[in-house]
Amino acid sequence: MFEWFSGRQGEILSSSLNILIVSVMLAMSIRLLLHRRKLAYISLIVSFVITIFCHLFSIYMASSGGARSATIVIKDSLQAAGLCLLMLGFYLLYNSVSRSKLVIGAASVCLSVIVAIVPFLGKSGIWAYITTDAYILLVLLVSMNWVVRKSGQRWILLSALSCYAVAAVLNLFQVNSPIPNFLLLAFYYLFAIMLFSRVIELLQSVTYSSITDGLTGLYNRKYFNSRVAHFVSQNIPVSVIFSDIDNFKKLNDTKGHHMGDEMLKLVAGIMKEESIGIGLPGRYGGEEIVFLVADPSVDVAQLAEKIRRRIEIESIVTASIGYSTYVPGLSVEELVKQADEAMYRAKTTGKNKVISFKDIC
């Protein structure tokens, strides 16, 4: 197997495999561009197209048994330009677009062409072959310092760049070995993993944002009700805790909406901490925060009182809390309404207290 990647046959095989991997990344980037219209994907698409042509030139050169200077210039220019655009695109996946970044990207691509052409304007011999490899090595070193620090998936990216750097060094010193072919293959394979991981991150982000409240990070009303319905459909004796921040309108009027938002986030944080392992919290609307207790072994009265006490101690607000436990025959709406009614009784009878729906029946 090792000899398959040696000589002209190895160049053809490795370039063919690289074209396959890059083509998959190209298709993924086009699909992402159609949905997100982000400049990073344009840079990646152009990079992948250039890279495919670069490897097609490599296959042509290996198949023809040699190449003229013009072909080498085109191939080297494509290789360096594709790498620069790839680094720029991956950087922009995790960072905002600015004019300076675009200028740097465009300048590096132009310099790729110049570096590849200059040796053939008056020089010959080894200098005509090592200049582009030296420039690629420089691009890789700059990327390791600049791109890796400011992008996600740092260790995979660093590993990929290291593979390319070692391959560039071996090519720079004219080492006759199949190792550079293996390393370039590993480079594109690692980049495919990173791009696929980015797709998963985006899907998770879209899913998370569709079921959570933007301010508090709690689950939204629709998702919360769907989870309650899931347990109710299985006749599991879950409980719903319904809380409402006392005098919230007065807080907004006297201390500003910023303070109101901060208190909402603080109360939401308490709910998140108390829900670990036993249920899930949600924002029902306005200053109303709910808590699905999915563990039947939990003493809901004690839990609700603990939450009320923490809110009173850890913030500048208090909360009126009501709760209700599911019994067979109740609908999701009825269960939540019972907890809401218990909360309303707590609010209208002094506030900053906990009341069970059973106590008002």
Image (tube, rainbow, N blue to C red):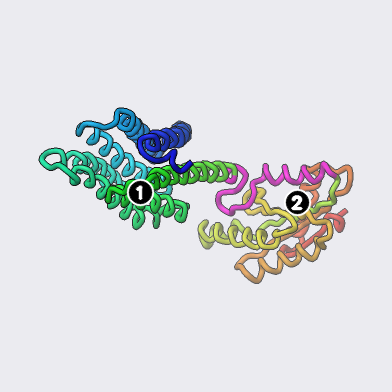
Which x, y percent locates residue 124?
14, 42
* Residue 5, placed above or below residue 27: below
- Residue ID at (62%, 50%): 286
Which of the two residues, 15 or 191, is positioned nearer the viewer here?
A: 15
Q: In the picture, residue 360 is in which quadrant?
A: bottom right
Q: Nearer the viewer, residue 58 or 30?
A: 58
- Dominant secondary structure, magenta: helix
Give the magenta-colored segment's residue range. 208-234
Q: Secondary structure at mark 1?
A: helix
Look at mark 2 in the image and give the residue it sits on.
340
Q: Can residue 56 be found in the magenta stretch? A: no
Identity of the amino acid at label 2?
Asp
The residue tagged 1 is 167
Gap between marks 1 and 2 measured at Cα: 66 Å
Q: Looking at this rendering, what residue extends furthest in the bottom direction?
A: 313
* Residue 74 found in image quarter: top left
Q: Where in the figure is residue 323, as x and y percent of width and height?
A: 79, 56
Residue 28 is situated, as x and y percent measured from the top left of the image, at 48, 35
